[in-house]
Image (cartoon, rainbow, N blue to C red):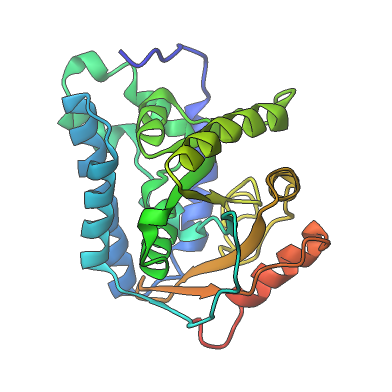
């Protein structure tokens, strides 16, 4: 149904890697926080299973899932005032390392699905769940831009397995292959099409992108708040679409409540390292646990 290929996959090596990451990340939340992570995993699992069973991947279901997430956790943010911008924004934010602890494994979901899905589900092993990853930034932007009818969020994501890909397409995401030729050209073309459609409806884009290109706490072995080096794609998008760049740092406290710190719009002549330092500074602010 979802077109998964039967490519060989080394589950043992993957599980060894997962165990090392989870052992290190487990010490980050408190006991109460770890219990919340279990609840958040359950919320995401229910959303995923229901979407697959009903073959219906919708933005409204995604927003309902986010609403349920924020009945479990609270979110606070700084009151940084946004400077004026005219054509939309590129929002750079960080991958949440603790998202790793809500990873959905094949064994979590197989019991909830009919046998016809069994060949598709094991491919989930290759990806982390993205729902909790997108929930804080989606909630923040929806709250901050109380005139959100003038804006539309566009997520930029690496391509995932077909089950996740169907959901991403339904929530207005542009997905690109990692380390493929002409990656930026394909991304630019996809965004051009979306922005053209937005302008016809007098809307502006809020393009959400993760400039690390990988999850902190996964790629750097379990420091969820030490950012990786930034890829340059978001800089090219800012140049080509004449958009300003807004850094938004997302962090959990030990009880898995969410703190968001937004910075000022970044100078367009910044290097990727300067932008990374800015976002890292927002993560390290004293009001973030």
Name the residue at 56% across, 66% down: 248
The quadrant in which residue 76 appears is bottom left
Name the residue at 28% across, 74% down: 32
x, y percent for residue 260: 47, 73
Name the residue at 74% across, 24% down: 182
Residue at the farthest bottom position: 286
The quadrant in which residue 45 appears is top left
For the N terminus, give its image quadrant. Answer: top left
Task: Tell me if I can see residue 213 in this picture.
Answer: yes
Nearest the eye: 44 or 91:
91
Left or right, 135 with reference to 207:
left
Tell me: residue 136, above or below residue 3: below
x, y percent for residue 286: 57, 88
Left or right, 83 with reference to 242:
left
Tell me: residue 16, above or below residue 3: below
Left or right, 67 with reference to 163:
left
Tell me: residue 92, above or below residue 122: below
Task: Tell me if I can see residue 13 in this picture.
Answer: no
Nearest the eye: 247 or 50:
247
Name the residue at 71% across, 28% down: 185
Nearest the eye: 182 or 95:
182
Tell me: residue 28, above or below residue 99: below
x, y percent for residue 271: 83, 60
Left or right, 7 with reference to 83:
left
The quadrant in which residue 86 appears is bottom right
């Amino acid at each position: 149904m979802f077109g998964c290929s039967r490519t060989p996959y080394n589950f043992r090596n993957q599980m060894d890697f997962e165990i090392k990451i989870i052992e290190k990340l487990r010490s980050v939340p408190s006991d109460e926080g770890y219990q919340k992570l279990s609840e958040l995993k359950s919320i995401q699992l229910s959303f995923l299973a229901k979407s697959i069973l009903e073959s219906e991947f919708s933005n409204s279901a995604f927003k309902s899932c986010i609403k349920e997430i924020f009945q479990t956790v609270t979110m606070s943010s700084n009151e940084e005032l946004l400077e004026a911008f005219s054509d939309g924004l590129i929002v750079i934010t960080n991958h949440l390392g603790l998202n790793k602890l809500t990873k959905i494994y094949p064994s979590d979901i197989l019991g909830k699905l009919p046998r016809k899905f069994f060949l598709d589900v094991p491919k989930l092993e290759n990806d982390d769940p993205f729902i909790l990853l997108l929930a804080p930034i989606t909630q923040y932007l929806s709250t901050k831009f109380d005139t959100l009818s003038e804006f539309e969020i566009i997520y930029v994501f690496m391509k995932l397995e077909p089950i996740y890909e169907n959901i991403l397409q339904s929530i207005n995401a542009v997905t690109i292959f990692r380390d493929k030729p002409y990656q930026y050209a394909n991304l630019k073309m996809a965004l051009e099409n979306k922005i053209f459609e937005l302008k016809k409806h007098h809307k502006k884009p809020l393009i959400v992108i993760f400039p690390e290109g990988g999850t902190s706490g996964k790629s750097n072995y379990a420091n969820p708040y030490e950012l990786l080096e930034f890829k340059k794609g978001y800089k090219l998008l800012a140049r080509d679409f004449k958009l300003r760049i807004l850094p938004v740092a997302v962090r959990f406290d030990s009880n898995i409540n969410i703190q968001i710190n937004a910075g000022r719009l970044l100078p367009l002549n910044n290097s990727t390292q300067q932008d990374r330092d800015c976002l890292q500074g927002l993560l390290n602010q004293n009001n973030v646990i």
